[in-house]
Image (cartoon, coloured by chain):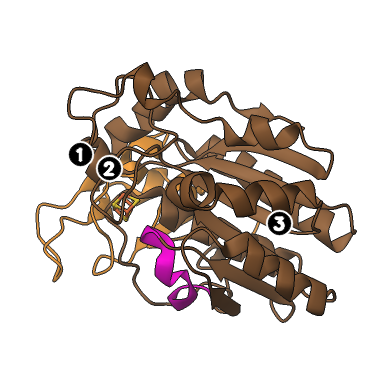
Amino acid sequence: MAKITVDTQNCKGCLLCVAACPRGLIKKDERLNKKGFNPVKCVDAAQCSGCCLCAVICPDCCIEVYKENT
Amino acid sequence: MEKIYSRPRSLRENPTHYCPGCGHGIAHKLVAQVVDELDIREKVIAIAPVGCAVIAYDYWDFDCSEAAHGRALAVATAIKRLRPENVVFTYQGDGDLAAIGTNETIHAANRGENLTVIFINNAVYGMTGGQMAPTTLLGQKTATTPRGRVAQEGLPLKISELLAGLGGVKYVERVSMHAPAEVLKAKRALTQAFQNQIDGVGFSLVEILSPCPTYWGKSPQKSAEWIRDVMIKEFPLGRIK
Ligand code: SF4
């Protein structure tokens, strides 16, 4: 079990995480944030492996990753 | 669930002024992570450049100084010589380190100052409006090379290879920000460059190929692909020295 959280108000919508996610779980949100950018969202949290690749490439530190301690 | 990835302690909460997809944000984060992991936050002193990263001190939560354009390594030399117990690094773009500051860069390297240099190569002047930099590729369109750079305007300056030829230089590696795996390699190189200074090894430089989507006229993802497919042919990745 793993999940990500996105700081949608500070996300600039660069979408680098969309390309980085090996499972294609991150998509652009059609709603704008207060800065006028389309932030991203995780569309299928159940599939997240907690690999952190989206967070690694994020230039704005908007993604936090959580993983079940096994 | 346990949090396994979040903002490093040495990176303030302030949102950056960088354009969407700019490599500076990734590079700042890596520096902050390395400072945290080496536990040198109370010892580190950064020298910020002139360029898009001019207010890097608003983002890092450790001591920073500003330098006049290109003079970061002169300021760093003074600080390190007066306070050898501190870990001193410069963070400079190509316009700063490889154009206006070439003189300071070459002489600091040749003196073998025990410093860490983080060199952001995005092949363009960002802050001033996307003009040609010494590192601009042949054929690359910029504000001052609207038809693409030609050889008469100089070949892309390989400052890392040039510096590697100097005896005072101990470590040079070129890394890139174009994919997560490359970002992780970049972090290892930065760790090495800081560890070298702590161990007294000497002048260590990490060149980071970094996207400037705004002045490359490309989306962040296309910019990453341009680094992968075009830029690393001119600036090959890996250990140079
Ligand atoms: S102009 Fe280029 S280098 Fe400067 S902040 Fe924007 S993307 Fe980054």
Q: Residue at x 15, y 58 (%)?
A: A37
Q: Kindly tell me whether mark 1's CB lies below 8 Å from ligand 1.
A: no
Q: Would residue A64 be found to the left or right of residue B168 on screen?
A: left
Residue B155 x, y percent position in the rendering: 45, 23
Q: Main secondary structure of the magenta part?
A: helix
Residues at marks 3 and 1, CA–CA distance in whole angstroms: 32 Å
Secondary-structure class at tag 3: strand
Q: In the rendered structure, which disc, 2 or 1, sits on the residue that comes first in sequence? A: 2
Q: Count neighbours of disc 1 (C-alpha within 10 A) and say few if under 14, some if 14 to 19, many if 20 or more.
A: some
Residues at marks 2 and 1, CA–CA distance in whole angstroms: 5 Å
Identified by mark 2, the residue type is Gln
Chain B's colour?
brown
* Mark 2 in CB contact with mark 1 (< 8 angstroms): yes
Secondary-structure class at tag 2: loop
Identified by mark 1, the residue type is Ala
**Residues in magenta?**
B51-60
Do the dots labelled 3 and 1 sit on one chain? yes
Chain A's colour?
orange
* Mark 2 in CB contact with mark 3 (< 8 angstroms): no
Chain at tag 3 = B
Report which residue position mark 3 lands on.
B116
Residue B180 x, y percent position in the rendering: 50, 40
Report which residue position mark 2 lands on.
B131
Q: Residue at x 30, y 24 (%)?
A: B149
Residue B106 x, y percent position in the rendering: 67, 46
Report which residue position mark 1 lands on.
B143
